[in-house]
Image (cartoon, coloured by chain):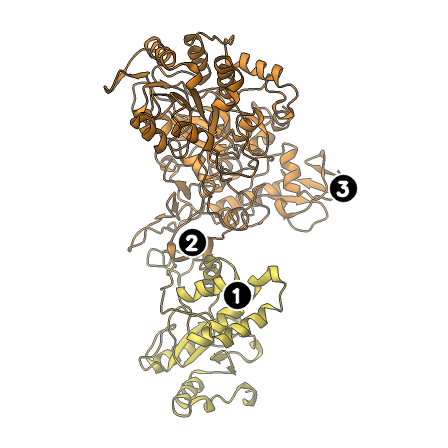
Amino acid sequence: MSFHPQMPYGEGWHRSQRRVPPDGPPFAFTPENLARLEDICSHYPPEQRKSAIIAALYLVQEQQGYITGNAMQHVAGVIGCAPAQVEDVVSYYVMFFTRPVGTYVVQVCRTLSCALRGAERVTEALCRHLHVSPGETTPDGMFTVVEFECLGACDRAPVIMVNNEHWHECQDPDKVTELVDALRSDGVAALSGCHLVKER
Amino acid sequence: METVALTIDGKSVTVEKGKTVLQAAIESGIKVPYYCYHPGLGIDGSCRVCLVKIEKMPKLQVSCSVVAAEGMVVQTETPEVVQARAGVFEFLLINHPLDCPVCDKGGECPLQDFSYAFGPKGSRMEFARRVFDGEGVRADVDFGPTLMLNRNRCILCTRCVRFMRDVDGDAQIGIADRGYGSEIATFKEEGVHSLLSGNLMDVCPVGAITTREYRFKSRPWDNPTAVDTICTLCEKGCNTTVWLKAKPEWAKGAQLARITPRYNPEVNGYWMCDIGRFRLAWIESEARLSQPLVREGNDAQTATTWDHALDTLKRLVGAHGSEHLRFLLSAHASHEEMFALSRLARQLLGDRAQQSCTVSWAASVKSQPEHTTFSVPPIDAPNVAGARLLGLTSVPVGEAEPDLSALRAAVEAGEVRVLYVLDPGPSGSLGDTAWIVDARQSGRIASLVLQGVLESPLAAAADVVLPGACFVEKEACYTNGQGRLQATARAIPPPGQALDDCSIIVRVAAALGRPLDYRSAADIRADIAATRSDEPGLQGIADMAFAQPVATHHWLEASNPMERWKWDVMFQDLPPVKFEEMLKK
């Protein structure tokens, strides 16, 4: 018995979702990244350095690709807070990855507008095309498919974003598989950006 | 003090400006349930059970986070509020297991009590509860060296998170996987490592956080008696409550079930440290000295009677002459004991009495986070300030280590023939004692007399051992590091033939032919008040109030006994603990 047919009980749903972050390789910010972080921190009052946790975690992902236990500890040390508080943030936001991801992280919005316009089918097509399930990386390390929360382009749903930079709007199952193929052959050049796409 | 006047349930209430509606309701004895609010932790507004109706506000408000304003009209009992509150309770119990009969908090649990009082009659939820057990996961997980966490029972009030962040100063607890997977977690599951971890059990409004020390040991209804006392394991002197288990004398195990903090805003607030909370096994341990011991010649110590022990003491002192007698006091000795012993020294030694008494204690720097708001002082003894007031030690304020150089020099020079040690504290409370044992064994001290409570190398080396009482076994006064005069209470009797330390000193004085005219500790306090009337730090010692054991059932009827601040104000029909009056004393 469940309050939603998609939410079965007893089979994992009501188990602990917690995954203790593995230590991973040793981590320390490069001097350049540390300087950038200090620059970001300077935007906040000194007693509010914790405000820079998200920025610091983005820097970790830029440097290492994903966030490990060691990285969380390093960030906590640099920011001056407890590692538990960093983990609190990492475990909440979908854009922070705790395992290695592919060269291209294809993030498909699943929030309301996109869901209404068929984002689920986009994800399905993508996953079928790449032979992965959401959250997984292809064996060649090229693509990771992630279901994302609102990307803020609801008027052109469904939306996907690649590597936190390139938006692609008004997607459908065919377009997205074409895009992935183009990415595989042409690299970043295939990411033409959303603004060139004409509205249907 | 600027005040605002508001109306709650038709009753006009005046509170200090800036207080919340919930605080106003609590202060005026109006029952509003709450979980996430704790007066020592500030406001969070996450549990939503303190809903009230405030006129001119369109929706129900969580009273813990609405600041009381002039002329507010608040309703806590309208059908709308009652129904909404019951709805919140129904949701809180969606996943909370109904294992109260086996839960450690059962019987003193606000969730249990408030659900009965304010919750719906039953639940409409039909699906299975969330359980963390199974598939390699356990609901009951280690939560550091002192605690266990049961994640099934957690209602995510975040009191523990806020305690660690705001009071302990090191936010070791966070919420992982916020959202439908929210759970209380520590980084890498390494648990809570803090000197204040025991307080997490107190702040937890359900049985999610329990201490390993008290877990499964006793249940609230097994502890029918409690005594308000103070902790004497450091110079902070936290106000505590000692809980006594109901058990026949012949039954195994300790009578002392647990020690919990008692609210005193000027000393410890709502908290106490783990040392005071968990270090209680020694009080009723097998290692307690329960009868006088005497060593004849080089034989082993033999148990004997008080008369024989005091005779032996008299013979030893007589043989060596009282001018070679020295006293070593632990700072665990109370005002009464220190004063009586120093008076005995004055009678025996006259002008040299001042130099004959030395006070010793143990000191250890506690490692605590930098920003903690509850720091545990380095001196591990309750009455160093008292020794200073009575002129027994000249170690200045701020100096943690005792000054034993004069006594050590005298022992090295062979001037000390008989050393009388008074130590009613736990093991290690005199600091390093190996040099005394060494001096006794090598003969630099001819005779060693120990008036103490625990077996120790020092007790083993002593020629006469007089068993005394520890801090929960006697009524005694101490001055804490702030210079505050506080008193312990007699919760349990001393073991076996052991006696109150004051009466031992009086008997020793009588045996040495210099009787002190004290019939009770109260006489000593009166004498202190009379002779040291000029000392502001000792004012009021003659009429110190000592708490008596009280029945705890009314606390259990009310709610979580850890939160006595609550029913002291909320349940006025019950025997109240009036902090204001106590503070005036």
Of all chains, the one bearing label 2 is B
Tell which chain the image draws in yellow: A
Residue at 53% over, 35% down: B236
Give the label, 1 or 3, closer to the camera: 1
Residue positioned 39% across, 60% down in the render? A7
The location of residue B432, given as percent across then percent down, is 39, 35
What amino acid is at disc 3? Gly
Q: Colour of chain B?
A: orange
- Decide if residue B220 is in sight here: yes
Q: Which mark is residue A53?
A: 1
What is the three-letter code of the residue carrying label 2?
Ala
Instruction: Compare residues B415 and B252 and report the one nearer the observer.
Output: B415
User: Badge 3 is on which residue?
Assistant: B71
Amino acid type, label 1: Ile
Residue B185: mark in rendering: 2
Furthest residue in direction front, as rendered? B413
> Helix, strand, or loop for circle 3?
loop
In the rendering, which numbered label is found on residue B407?
Answer: none
Residue A112: where, in percent of width, then height? 52, 70
Q: Nearer the viewer, mark 1 or mark 2?
A: 1
> Cα distance, mark 1 to mark 2?
19 Å
Q: Secondary structure at mark 1?
A: helix
